[in-house]
Amino acid sequence: MKKNCQHCSTPEGMAMHLFIRVSHMHHAAIEGRVMKLGFHHSQHRMLMHLAKYEHIPSQKELADAMGITPAAVTTTLKRLEREGYITRTVTDEDNRRNEIRITDAGLKAINESRVLFDSVDRQMFKGISEDELKAFTATLERMRDNLGEEISREA
């Protein structure tokens, strides 16, 4: 067990330490690739969020979905628009509402980032068998369910 880890004296503590460390490393690997594409984290996150909508979201819907302020949405959308990844047009029905559309450049960036993300994931799971991955996934699902029960009890 890791000597400088104060929570690693139990198997659960060690597992959580490693789980969090791997999560941070995965995040850092993804962030590094996003930066190489020329995006700030918030810009990329918003572009990916926009790509999954079936309808054109309002800026308020985006703020709510992403857990950020409407002002932060506005700032990020301005940057994305300035860089040619989205367009915004005022709707005919409501002059306060902008229609947001991803441009071809935005779609290209999303596709490039998905390729990079897949590469990071393949590297992370390299050498892990399909059975090990299934067991890991089942364990994560059980952990999610256990925490869900804990959260429900607290509410």
Image (tube, rainbow, N blue to C red):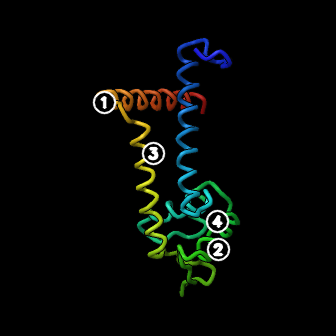
Closer to the chain start, of discs 3 and 1, is: 3
Closer to the chain start, of discs 2 and 1, is: 2
Q: Which amino acid lies under the numbered mark 4 shown in the image of this protein?
A: Val
Query: What residue appears at the point 45 percent right and 45 percent down from the top-left corner?
Result: 120
Q: Which amino acid lies under the numbered mark 3 shown in the image of this protein?
A: Val
Q: CB of mark 3 within 8 Å of CB of mark 2?
A: no
Dot 1 falls on a residue whose secondary structure is loop
Query: What residue appears at the point 58 percent right and 38 percent down from the top-left corner?
Result: 24
Closer to the chain start, of discs 3 and 2, is: 2
Q: What x and y, as percent, mark residue 73?
A: 64, 65
Residue 78 circle label:
2
Position of 148 relative to 123 (above/below): above
Give whichever of 144, 153 is nearer the camera. Answer: 144
Closer to the chain start, of discs 1 and 4, is: 4
Dot 2 falls on a residue whose secondary structure is helix
Mark 2 and mark 4: Cα distance apart in space: 8 Å
Instruction: Name the residue beneath numbered marker 4.
Output: 73
Q: CB of mark 3 within 8 Å of CB of mark 1?
A: no
Residue sitting at the far top:
9
Instruction: Name the residue beneath numbered marker 3.
Output: 120
Q: Which amino acid lies under the numbered mark 2 shown in the image of this protein?
A: Lys
Closer to the chain start, of discs 3 and 4, is: 4
Give whichever of 13, 109 is nearer the camera. Answer: 109
Query: What residue appears at the point 59 percent right and 76 percent down from the top-left corner?
Result: 81
Binning the other alpha carbons within 10 Å of mark 4 as few (below 14), some (14 to 19) or many (20 upward) gives: many
Quadrant position of residue 121: top left
Residue 129 circle label:
1
Of tags 1 and 4, the one toward the viewer is 1
Mark 2 and mark 1: Cα distance apart in space: 44 Å
